[in-house]
Amino acid sequence: MAEAIESSVIRKVKLGKSNLSVSNIALGTLPFASYRNKNNKNGLSELVSYAYSVGINLFDTAEVYDNYELLGASLKGLDDAIIITKAYAIDEKDVSRSLLKARRLMKRDVDIFMLHEQESVFTIKGHLKALEYMNKLKERGDIKAVGISTHRISGVKGVLSFLELIDIVMAIINYAGLGIYDGVRDEMELALEECYKANVGIIGMKIFGGGHLVRIIDKAIEYVRGLDFIHSFLLGVQTVDELKLDLYLFGGLQVEKTLLESYKKKIRRIEIEPWCTGCGICVDRCGQGALRLIDGKVEVISDRCVLCSYCAQVCPDFSIKVV
């Protein structure tokens, strides 16, 4: 009965001008990056199997997550699953190397290849050789669609100058506007809507603000449910139970109050991503004295952290997550 309800939440949509039919909910695998969740590697296989069983066919990874082998093994036998990967490729050589690595380790083709973390029209232009080669690969049938990911409004707007080369944009969007580097939520909405009208496929990511919005997850999901210019939303969860709860909320279904409150209050912790630059802005912002700089990197003093998320609001690189 539960799976039937959850399946009814999932629907297939055409992903912009691409020929891909994808689920409106996608599964992100950042929680299973090699530098995270080291004791729960088997959990991804269970999660992928369940997601696929309820109709999710879109799965996202990235070269930097270093989880290709794990994801490939989890997807074994699911031949019609659609795979996104992202890489910091600049030219033809970089694209070839990254794509070959993904195929070799996952033991399957990549469907959507993206340039990771593009900042603006200028950075996209700086990766023009890579984009042009990615489109040659698409013409040959080696990949099915080309895209970029971005945390910036200027990155989304930059897509509009390269519509002949970019099929899909994956962008950060959430209730609190967390992680949007160069503006506010309403501005990101307008930029994404403009791309949507230009027939670009839109994938929304970080809808829980890197875990900081789990305490108001019902509001966070209610917000994104109203965004009709986004084709698919990425969910980065760690367990089947978390995914089930998210799907109930996405469907506007009644969730037992005690279960919802328990999920919101689940013991969590702040984690600093490896790409932290050690700028120290978050240390100054933390009123609890729970962050400190050690050898140019931020460390968390766990017994002082109250998970207020003020640090994440000022982090310029979205390096602070709640896990």
Image (cartoon, rainbow, N blue to C red):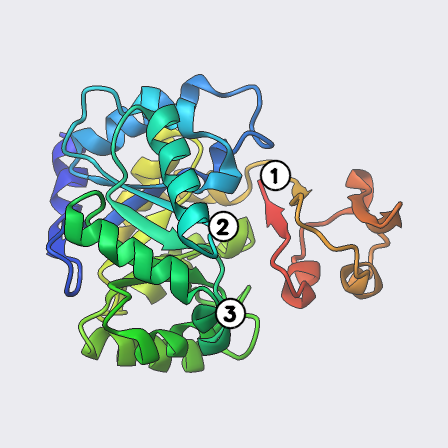
Q: Is residue 113 left or right of residue 21?
A: right
Residue 142 percent coordinates (x, y)? 21, 42
Q: Distance between the residues labelled 2 and 3?
A: 27 Å
Kindly identify the residue that appears in the image at 40 percent across and 52 percent down: 92
The residue indicated by pointer 3 is: 119
Residue 79: where, in percent of width, then height? 16, 28
Who's the residue at 32% across and 49% down the image?
Answer: 113
Q: Within 10 angstroms of label 3, few (less than 14), some, or many (20 or more) residues?
A: many
Give the CA distance from mark 1 to mark 3. 30 Å
Is 61 left, or right, of 322 in this rendering? left
In the rendered structure, which amino acid carries the disc numbered 1?
Answer: Arg
Q: For residue 252, say whether it is visible.
A: no
First in residue order: circle 2 vs circle 3: 3
Which mark is drawn over residue 268?
Answer: 1
Q: x, y (%) of residue 256?
A: 33, 41
**Disc 2: CA contacts within 10 A as few (<14), some (14-19) or many (>=20):** many
**Is residue 96 positioned above or below 77 on the image?**
below
Residue type at the position of mark 3: Glu
Task: Please tell me which residue is depicted at 71% across the width and 60% down the height of the picture.
Answer: 311
**Residue type marked 2:** Val
Classify the position of the N terminus by image quarter.
top left
Q: Do the residues labelled 1 and 2 touch (CB within 8 Å)?
A: yes
Residue 162 seen by the camera? yes
Q: Is mark 2 on a helix, strand or loop?
A: helix
- The residue closer to the viewer here, 302 or 21, is 21
Q: What element carries label 3?
A: loop
Extreme-front residue of the structure: 93
**As drawn, is 121 to the left or to the right of 24?**
right
Kindly identify which residue carries mark 2.
214
Instruction: Name the disc covering residue 233, or none.
Output: none
Labels 2, 3: front one: 3
